[in-house]
Image (cartoon, helix red, strand yellow):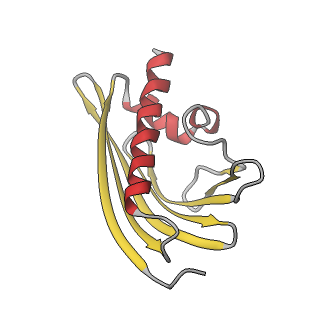
């Protein structure tokens, strides 16, 4: 086990997608659409108090578990959720996320804000932030292919 520690960090990523807020929102709320840009969930209950759970990893490697709890959902406007990440039996982070969807002239402006507590050196804010940027880029590619 690593030495016990907590590193706190907040990051914000903004993207503009050339489609309506309802279509971008559905990319987060519809499990089939979400699976085009985020790992397919083992459990997906998109309701306040519902959970999204994904377990996976490389063959023969460590199993990672993502477990989200939806705290607030305002259709086509925002999603607020908390999530934890585990590496095997070790909790590596806990985060609070808000995703806002704002109609703009050329589509939807998405604002993703994450406040994370990164535990015991298993994960870092920089690694998580890079992964989030890549995820939002993949979401943009998936939305473009539908248009």
Looking at the image, residue 101 lies above or below residue 128: above
Residue 22 lies left or right of residue 83; in this view the side is left
Q: Is residue 88 left or right of residue 108?
A: right
Q: Is residue 85 left or right of residue 12?
A: right
Q: Residue furthest right?
A: 60
Q: Residue at x 47, y 32 (%)?
A: 138
106 up-or-down from 1: above or below: above
Q: Quadrant of the N terminus?
A: bottom right
Farthest residue to the left: give it. Answer: 105
Res 30 quadrant in image: top right
At 64% from the left and 33% from the top, the residue drawn is 32
Q: Is residue 118 above or below residue 100?
A: below
Q: Quadrant of the C terminus?
A: top left
Location of residue 115 in the rendering, given as x and y in whole percent from the top left corner: 36, 64
- Residue 28 position (above or below residue 145): below
Image coordinates of residue 127 in percent, x first then y, are 43, 55
Q: Position of residue 118 (x, y in %)?
A: 45, 70
Farthest residue, direction bottom: 4
* Image quarter of residue 25: top left
Picture residue at 56% right of the left edge, 40% below the top: 38
Q: 20 or 122: which is nearer to us?
A: 122
Residue depicted at x 65% and y 60%: 65
Label total for image: 0
């Amino acid at each position: 086990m690593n030495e016990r520690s907590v590193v706190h960090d907040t990051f914000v990523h903004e993207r503009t997608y050339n489609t309506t807020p309802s279509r971008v929102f559905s990319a987060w709320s519809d499990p089939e659409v979400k699976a085009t840009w985020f790992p397919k969930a083992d459990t997906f209950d998109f309701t306040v108090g519902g959970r999204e759970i994904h377990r996976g990893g490389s063959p023969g490697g460590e199993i990672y578990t993502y477990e989200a709890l939806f705290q607030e959902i305002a259709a086509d406007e925002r999603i607020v959720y908390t999530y934890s990440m585990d590496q095997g039996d070790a909790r590596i982070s806990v985060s609070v996320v808000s995703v806002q969807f704002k109609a703009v002239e050329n589509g939807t402006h998405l604002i993703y804000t994450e406040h994370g507590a990164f535990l015991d050196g298993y994960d870092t804010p920089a690694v998580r932030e890079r992964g989030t940027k890549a995820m939002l880029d993949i979401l943009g590619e998936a939305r473009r292919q539908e248009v």
